[in-house]
Amino acid sequence: MFTLAEVASLNDIQPTYRILKPWWDVFMDYLAVVMLMVAIFAGTMQLTKDQVVCLPVLQSTVNSKAQPGSSGKADFTTVETTTGQGEEKDSSGRKTNLDFQQYVFINQMCYHLALPWYSKYFPYLVLIHTIILIVSSNFWFKYPKTCSKIEHFVSILGKCFESPWTTKALSETACEDSEENKQRLTGAQSLPKYVSTSSDEGSPSASTPMITKSGFKFSADKPMIEVPSVTILDKKDGEQAKALFEKVRKFRAHVEDSDLIYKLYVGQTVIKTVKFIFILCYTANFVNTISFEHICNPKVEHLIGYTQFECTHNMAYMLKKLLISYISLICVYGFICLYTLFWLFRIPLKEYSFEKVREESSFSDIPDVKNDFAFLLHMVDQYDQLYSKRFGVFLSEVSENKLREISLNHEWTFEKLRQHVSRNAQDKQELHLFMLSGVPDAVFDLTDLDMLKLELIPEAKIPAKISQMTNLQELHLCHCPAKVEQTAFSFLRDHLRCLHVKFTDVAEIPAWVYLLKNLRELYLIGNLNSENNKMIGLESLRELRHLKILHVKSNLTKIPPNITDVAPHLTKLVIHNDGTKLVVLNSLKKMTNVAELELQNCELERIPHAIFSLSNLQELDLKSNSIRTIEEIISFQHLKRLTCLKLWHNKIVSIPSSIIHVKNLESLYLSNNKLESLPAAVFSLQKLRCLDVSYNSIALIPVEIGLLQNLQHFHITGNKVDVLPKQLFKCVKLRTLGLGQNCITSIPDKISQLLQLTHLELKGNCLDRLPATLGQCQLLRKSGLVVEDHLFDALPSEVKEVLNQDTSIPFANGI
């Protein structure tokens, strides 16, 4: 026999699982316990009292039964035992010739022969059936593939229910609803203070969801109504709540992809129903076999002389009553199983809607869930619907954003932000925020900020408070699709001058960017492949009437025709490709006002002919392309305003003599090419002030260099020059001279003629000494002299003293 403790352990479910047990499961558990007690009670009685008592049926009695007119009733004999002689007699005084041991033998034998099997094994069948029902009821809590999910769900659900953030979020929702109702009743008298009055298009209400202009729409978040905080959420509670959001998100992704728990629960309910039908069918057939009277015909006549016995089953009455009770219990159990099946298939339990929660709270974004996640929530609703309502708070992105906002503002105070403010090279105050959950409110209290950089902040929101930052003129959005309120947009539209947008996909560019009518500079950095060119939205750049600089760093195969829409007012265009070949450039012809043009890393093999139509072009930069020949350079003679030509980092092998026709050139950059010589035509450009031919294969500096009387910067670093011509030192206006990494063996004393020299690079040559006349270069200092230490140390002390002087150089940075 099983002990009660051993059997009860099958139904020992953790108390925390009670929230997943609806009333019918609880009721069936109690019914199973009662049935278990019936089985144990019946089994115990059988072990202690179950027996049969048999008496022989005499032959005369049998014959008398067969005579006509007999009553038809058995004439039971009675046994009288004479203790003195050990004899046994029937009621008429006749001897039965049976002693006590023989009666014991017959009783035992007839117990197995005459008593039906159901009377003997009924308690054990009830016990087995009950154990199967108990196991079926709780198998989904024990099965490994469902147990872990259920345990995880119950753990998360309990933490969500008890989290201080749940109480705070629901309480603030109630306060917001109350405040909104109050404003609705009073005519929303306080609402105008959240609405911008500086907009040219008027002052839309604060609840206006979108701004429409030129076909573009963007979110204008509703200003949050300030309500008193109901509870105080400390940092520890905030971190725990954020961890819960992450756990809920991961659990949902893990559970929503299968419906194993639902199928297992349906399966065990079906098994219990089938078990109920089976028990009811066969038990009803055997209920009448449990009787008090039985006829026994043992084949032992040769031992005792009698062939038939009348037996009585002492426990028949009690077992029959217990069986009827068991049948009643199993019927109730079965009806509950049928109700469970009806509930399982009446509604779609693999779908769960938080519609009611969305209506009762401000978290209208709580998503509906499916599969096992939905089924578990349906089961929880049978226990208490409050659990699902509080759990829904952690499925809402709005709720999570509110939590992040509170935690963010708690961590990033005004004092901490002030410590992160720095001054950039332009002597402007800038603040760089990186990988935060949002933009702290205290940022907008830094009213003296000139530049704001927001990087990797996916939930960035710019509120109306930004209107306090009157000095703000430059904004960087790096992978940060920021949303703005109506008033904030009005401020940015009127005050922002420079905007940098870095993105992965073109859809990340906020639509309001194209509506900033006073924008001067726009930098777009991201993927703008040919399929998405039409999505750039550059057709709306025509609204940016004051845009002067457009910088596009991407992978374009052609210049989008829409860029030319801004040509009338664009003065600088920069296109940096990632190595993708830029093929179509005809649209450049329309950009007649462009003064600066950069086409870098575009795999160009020749100078594009479209450039020759840009009559106002002053600076052209074709860096990092694949240009091999520049024979077209003669066409630059038509660009009367071209003063700077940058052809560096290409594959140019020679400079054509036709460069002489580009008479207005002041700067020529040809570094990192494959030049082997410099033609005399280069030195006919009398206006040339900067010449950079570094990192080529040039072996000789032509003596014609002395003709460049206006030359101020000359770089020939990284070549094969071994001798410096004396004519070089006739360029008395030289201020920067780069001669490093060559084969130069000596520096002429005439270097003293370069009185304006402030930077001299000699490192990496074959020098054994420096001329003492370096001391006569009045503006040259040690910081501007790039040379090996031993060469500097070999200079005369008076020269080193002059070079070490720390005096101000009034014209050092001038041109």
Image (spheres, rainbow, N blue to C red):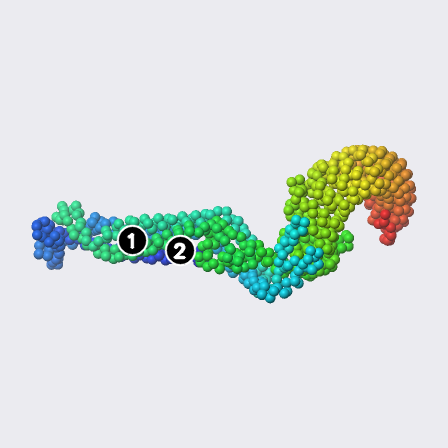
Q: Is residue 711 visible?
A: yes
Q: Are marks 2 and 1 in contact (CB under 8 Å)?
A: no
Label 1 environment density (alpha carbons within 10 Å; few <14, some 14–19, many ≥20): many
Q: Residue at x 68, y 53 (%)?
A: 454
Q: Circle 2 is placed at which residue position?
A: 25
Residue occupying the point 91% across, 41% down: 730
Q: Residue at x 16, y 52 (%)?
A: 310
Q: Position of residue 352 (x, y in %)?
A: 49, 52
Residue type beneath disc 2: Asp
Q: Quadrant of residue 361?
A: bottom right
Q: As rendered, which of 493 and 187 lies closer to the eye?
A: 187
Q: Is residue 444 above or below residue 266?
A: below
Q: Residue at x 17, y 48 (%)?
A: 297
Q: Is residue 741 visible?
A: no
Of the numbered discs 2 and 1, the one sitting upstream in the chain is 2
Relative depth, front residue between 570 and 796: 570
**Residue type beneath disc 1:** Pro
User: Which residue occupies the foreground of this view, 116 or 553?
Assistant: 553
User: In this rendering, would 548 be left or right of 75?
Assistant: right
Counting the numbered discs, the total is 2
Pinpoint residue 474: horizontal percent, then vertical percent. Answer: 73, 53
Within-10-Å neighbours for mark 2: few <14, some 14–19, many 20+: some
- Secondary element under disc 1, as helix, strand or loop, is helix
Disc sitting over residue 123 in the figure: 1
Residue 607 x/y as whole percent: 77, 36
Determine the secondary structure under disc 2: helix
